[in-house]
Amino acid sequence: MPGDDGYQHDLLVIGGGGAGLRAAIAAAEESNRLSIAVLSKVYPMRSHTVSAEGGTAAVMRENDSLDTHAKDTIFGSDFLADQDVVEVFVKEAPGEVIRLEHWGCPWSRDPDGRVSVRPFGGMTVNRTLYAADKTGFHMLHALFQTSLKYERITRYDEWFATSLLLEDGKVCGVTALMEFVQYHPTGLPGTGILITEAARGEGGHLKNKDGYRYLQDYGLGPPTDTPVHRKMELGPRDILSRCHIQEHQKGRTFDGPDGHYVHLDLRHLGEKLIDKNLPFVRELARNYVGIDPVHEPIPVRPVVHYMMGGISTDITGKTSLDGLYAAGEAACVSINGANRLGSNSLTELLVFGARAGRAAARHAQERPTLRSNPLAQLASDERRRLDQRFLRADGREKIADIREEMQKAMESGCGIYRDRATMEGTCQTLRKLRERFAHISLADKDAIFNTELIAALELECTLDVAETVARSALAREESRGSHTRTDFPKRDDARFLKHSLAYRTPDGPRIEYLPATITRWPPEERKY
Amino acid sequence: MTEETMTLEVTRYRPGHDREPRTESFTVPYRKDWVVLDALNHIKDRIDGTLSYRWSCRMGVCGSCGMMVNGVPKLTCAAFLRDYRPGPIRVGPLANFPVIRDLVIALDDFMEKLRRVKPWIIRAVEKPVADGEYLQTPAQLDAYKQFSMCINCMLCYAACPVYGLEPAFVGPAAIALAYRYNLDSRDEGYRLREPVLAIALAYRYNLDSRDEGYRLREPVLSEAVGVWECTFVGECSVVCPKGVDPAAAIQRSKLAGATDWLLSMIMPWGGRR
């Protein structure tokens, strides 16, 4: 916490992941007069961008076009992406990945020295740049190390933002599209550790317990020896996750201590290719399941992966709160709609991180200095709130209990398949958990490195997010992208070619709708 | 059947409460797929919410959860309970660092040193984005790739006997990262990194018979303790969880520095690469 006087900067970036660091650098380059700060709850190079594996999509080759990338993205989104935003996204993507190349990102290369591109799910052309299978790690470190060059960027490492202080905050924040939660079809059972889609891009096969490539039974065939774009294992994530559940219902998956799973078979790729392009997959499989993918198939199952929704922003990253911008997975701009294509998210954090950074820098230059007196009062109120709420409170509820029950409720009611009854149950459970959270008890009352307090603050936010997911999902009476309802199995463009917007109220989120922007690609049946 | 358990002997330290670190024992369920970090999370969730430590990705790539496990620097997300049976397992904060609380060490010194080696691409003239990427062959990529795999987990500093004795030593990870950029075909910043890395230039003039500036350079030298401090024990490379070889980076930087130094001795006032 700051001293009574606090610290002053022209622009504060909250979060030191890929989007935050890209925004900070963009702001520093936009103006050489601004004082910029990056506040991050972990050291920036620990941020979750580090875990992204497979790659970053951008049009880099003569056989590709911006329109093809746009169409693949819109098709993948089940037509809920804003098409004007997607057009900007694909147009600015190549420049952003080249800029990162200039900043030292060790992209994998072709023999002629150009950056390599690989196939990825739902894409019609090879357009995913990669750094073996640690793309997010290398991008994050390149961004972080490059950010060290700018002396005007001050860092607050391991600081946690608890509240936004609004001088005259009448407007309420809005999140969009929260019901769309992506399951990645290939995570390790138990730990949920991701086995990248690149394993399938390189030619890996998904097989059921009979060794059969079951995706051919779900309209994704025919099976071929070498990967074909958008077919079989290169289908989009929402469809592959549903296929897994259906295969399980037919009794054709394996059963293990951590639930049902299928096999991801890489053996036919050979040790040389695996070590060159998928070394991290081999390392993870060996360490966490004791399997060497050169010799044995890897057990995999769908795992919760990515939020398509987030803080609603316009095409510049601006939110409904004056002076607040958002980008990356926290934001919904929206290019992902109802289902994100793999390798678009790393590109998104570059393109829209840079846009938000530039827009915020322009805003900071134009805006007169804030009056500090009311802010100091608000800051001291917030400090008192945290103290009374958590450090002096004496309740009975434990963080871990509420967190586990929340996770169970979300998995049972808002999983890959959903219906009204289970979602209503989840909404009720979440309300009760919120009441119980009011009686939370912390063992740790220390002011120094209190990770239990951070866990409580995170849980409070996660309960908010969970409720917006469940309420938005309950209100969307159709199936689209990652949101699949057994009681409304069809897409309903007449009623729901719209973004759900969630507004906070004391009784839980209020849901409103905003039409998706269609420019050149009218909705059609989404078939691969 | 009673549940199988394991004991963890964990170092505790609360500033303002404990004068010195102490050890506390916790008994946790034994699961064969649990790592030490899972056991710590179990303690925090179910036994003692005040236990403090860092963790994030839980898959060996973020570098947060390095600790001493039975006296050896380890990522606790990759240290399996089954490899330490029957226990007990001793878990402590990384050696050679100031402790903030319990298992949490202070990284400020490394963060400052990292910036000092200029770990970014330096060019005399930057290429416009519109002109496309720099071409870099797979062989040119391989030249520096392993040094780019560093996750900044600090295990090498905890293992480094020189850093333990001489905190001014830039240290294995920062040197490996400086070397990573020096070896990158896109980079032209070799000379700018050299003062920190090799300080060969200062030595070169100090050793020059015509020079009388030894004392003027002394503050710079004592501050910029670089690769010359390393006694090449090689422990840094042994403990690295990502197969980076900082010892090789240090040794090869030494050779490069020495070569420059020799060159400059042969050709005084010039001849540096």
Image (spheres, rainbow, N blue to C red):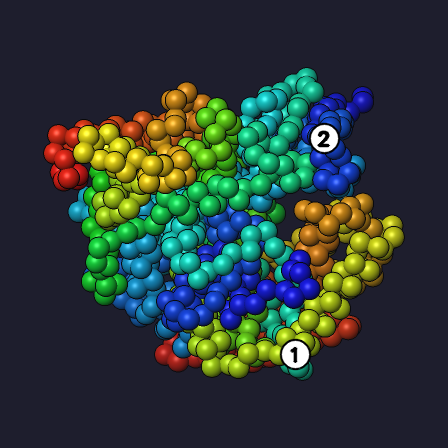
Q: Can residue A361 be seen from the camera position used here?
A: yes
Residue placed furthest toward the front: B212
Amino acid identity at mark 2 = Glu
In space, the residues marked 2 and 1 are separated at their CA atoms by: 45 Å
Residue A275, quarter of picture:
top left
> Under tag 1, what secondary structure?
loop
Q: Mark 1 — residue?
A: A167
Q: Tell me if mark 2 has few (under 14), some (14-19) or many (20+) residues whose alpha carbon lies within 10 angstroms of its own.
A: few
Amino acid identity at mark 1 = Glu
Residue at figure coordinates x 87%, y 52% from the top left: A394
Q: Give percent across and percent down for residue B85.
A: 65, 18
State which quarter of the image contains the C terminus of chain A: bottom left
Give the left or right position of residue A215, taking residue A303 as reference: left
Q: Is residue A170 above or below residue A164?
A: below
Residue A343, quarter of picture:
bottom left
Looking at the picture, tell me which residue is in the foreground, A330 or B102.
B102
The reply to whether callout 2 and callout 1 are in contact (CB within 8 Å) is no
Residue B20, label in figure: 2
Residue at figure coordinates x 58%, y 31% from the top left: B94
Q: Is residue A5 above or below residue A49?
A: below
Looking at the picture, tell me which residue is in the foreground, A138 or B246.
B246
Q: Give percent across and percent down for residue A74.
A: 42, 69
Q: Is residue A66 above or below residue B44?
A: below
